[in-house]
Image: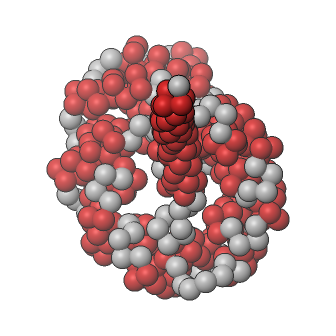
Amino acid sequence: MAKNRRFVTVLGLAAGTCSAAMVIVAVAGPVLRRREVEALVREADATLSPPLTDRSDVDEVDCDRADALLREALDLDPHHGPAQRLEPLASGCSALRRGDLILAEGALRTASTQLEDDPRPQCWLGWLALVLGRPDAARTHFERSLEIDPGHAPSRLGLSDALAESGMADDALRVLDDLAGAPNGIVEVRRGMVLEDLGRDEDAERAYRLAAELSPGQAAPWNNLAALARERGDLDAAWELQQRAVELAPDDPVMLLNAGLLAIAVGLDDRAEELLGRAAELDHDTADPARALADHLLVRGVVERALEVLGPAIEQFPRDAALRNSLGNALAAAGRPGEARRAYQTALDTDEGLAEAHNGLAALSMAEGDLAGALVELERALELSPDNEQARQNLSVVRDRLAERDLASGGDRLAQAHP
């Protein structure tokens, strides 16, 4: 019996030992999963907070990756508090990057309540306000972010942009001067832009050249140097500088667009078509490259090719009034005045202040002999855009023709009175 009891005891101990091992294994699973979740959250958090030396601003944050990491973390542990609190920030910035502004605002406002001591939600709300064209609101958000963390560099950069957008360039420059740390290429680009706003082009050029030295892989300094060279009329230098920008950012539609426009200016028509075509392929946010390409083709007399470019672009950007105006120009050149008139009118339905569309309608009326109708459209065009040279030239032609007609009409009446 004793042996049996000892055996039972031993079995009991053995069973207990096995149970302990099973418990260890069972506990190890949640521990490992918690560590995995924490690692995912840490990586997402770091992704949402890139160092200023590596990124130009929050617009360059890999929001989609951060959002995916946090969703993976919440799939593993739906109740993980830090992941729950951080996820609205990631989803909000991701929505902003893809242009879903309503979703972005809702998510970022949620993030601002869940992360009250974190400057990033207010910073992102500031960038959203800038996208919406509300620099005063942006300024408020950036200032709130800096109240939370006075050293938050992206917020300081954003605040300088908001001040510059509000016409407060001197204040914007002071904000940039307050950025602590060693000289930084990104800050110098911003400084150059503000100095341009102040009319200090030489100082702006020095800032851009310093930025190019500090951040040799950044395209923005070269792009901005090219713009300065173009403004002073040195097109060859501008073209060389812009090519450097394209070398550094070969898939950036803005760099390609600017290079294409400069190629036109220096007479490199085929190269311009290549650059603008590539920019149009890459730019999913604006119709600017497609419109520039179509206008360039139209000037070259390649009307059908221009129409081929405009068709898909209008499908992608149906509310772009300037694109519809370009379509009107192409249709008029193709000898399709009825369709051209509809295109101009659609452009004005979208943007009634588009002077170019009024000028286009005037040109059609002139071709049809409706000088009175052309006069109305041209006067409206110049009311909207007093410096529109094409409209001014057309108005001069219309007035000359009306004067000639009135003179001829007066002569006819005189002949009838005195046969």
Position of residue 38 in the picture relative to residue 317 (left or right): right
Position of residue 43 in the picture relative to residue 170 (left or right): left
Counting from the top left corner in percent of width and height, residue 5 is at 54, 29
Counting from the top left corner in percent of width and height, residue 125 is at 71, 48
Position of residue 82 in the picture relative to residue 305 (left or right): right
What residue do we see at 41% from left, 37% from top?
Answer: 284
Splitting the image into 4 quarters, where does residue 195 fall? bottom right
Splitting the image into 4 quarters, where does residue 353 fall? top right
Colouring mode (rainbow / by chain / secondary structure / one colour): secondary structure
Above/below status of 229 relative to 65: below
What residue do we see at 53% from left, 68% from top?
Answer: 51
Position of residue 313 in the picture relative to residue 268 (left or right): right
Camera sees residue 33: no
What residue do we see at 43% from left, 66% from top?
Answer: 220
Counting from the top left corner in percent of width and height, residue 136 is at 79, 54
Counting from the top left corner in percent of width and height, residue 375 is at 58, 30
In-front residue for pair 78/130: 78
What residue do we see at 53% from left, 48% from top?
Answer: 35
Above/below status of 260 relative to 88: below
In-front residue for pair 407/388: 388
Above/below status of 350 relative to 300: above
For the image, the number of numbered tags is 0
In-front residue for pair 317/183: 183
